[in-house]
Image: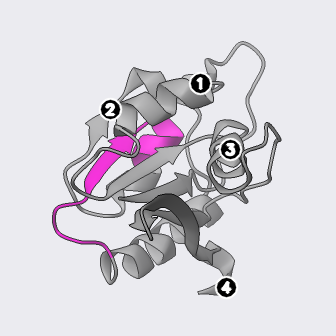
Amino acid sequence: MDLILWRHAEAEVIAPGQDDLQRVLTPKGERQARRMAAWLNHRLAASTRVLVSPALRCRQTADALGREVRIVPAIAPDAPVAALLEAVRWPRSSEPVLVCGHQPTLGQVAAHLLAGVQQDWAVKKGAVWWLRWRQRDGEPEVTLHAVQGPDAL
């Protein structure tokens, strides 16, 4: 199973009294989303499920893919690792899954799956971490397939 963790692109700073879920991408964030979406679309299988946080900044980031997305409340800001892994059906999903979500959850998922630790690993805004689960010699294995930042494209 492939699990692609995509942190939303750069968003406006929250204003006093503003609902965090309504923050929008900055112009830089829109460029980051378009660049990363182009990179992803050259690599993602057509069968990839795209799951997105209900936060507007995540929806805007994922919209750049031009693919069907599903809004999943279980991956909203501050979602627990277990909720995200359940939403993506880790590691049972028969198709690749791309999650457009938030820190610190995405970094925590990467730390848990790659190193078996509870830590807040940093995933930069707009960046992708591509993880792959497989059986190797009868043992489950998680590998880091790719890490890509939007500003390096």
Q: Residue at x 45, y 70 (%)?
A: 136
Query: Amino acid type of disc 3?
Result: His
Query: Amino acid type of disc 2?
Result: Ile
* Badge 1 vs badge 2, beta-carbon distance below 8 Å: no
Residue named by callout 3: 112
Residue 68 in the image, given as x and y percentages of width and height: 19, 50
Mark found first going from the N terminus, 1 or 2: 2
* Badge 2 vs badge 4, beta-carbon distance below 8 Å: no
Residue named by callout 4: 152
Residue 15 in the image, given as x and y percentages of width and height: 75, 26
Cα gap from disc 4 to disc 1, whole angstroms: 28 Å
Query: Amino acid type of disc 4?
Result: Ala
Mark found first going from the N terminus, 2 or 4: 2
Q: Which residues are magenta?
A: 44-60
Element carrying mark 2: strand
Q: Is residue 86 visible from the viewing direction of this image?
A: yes
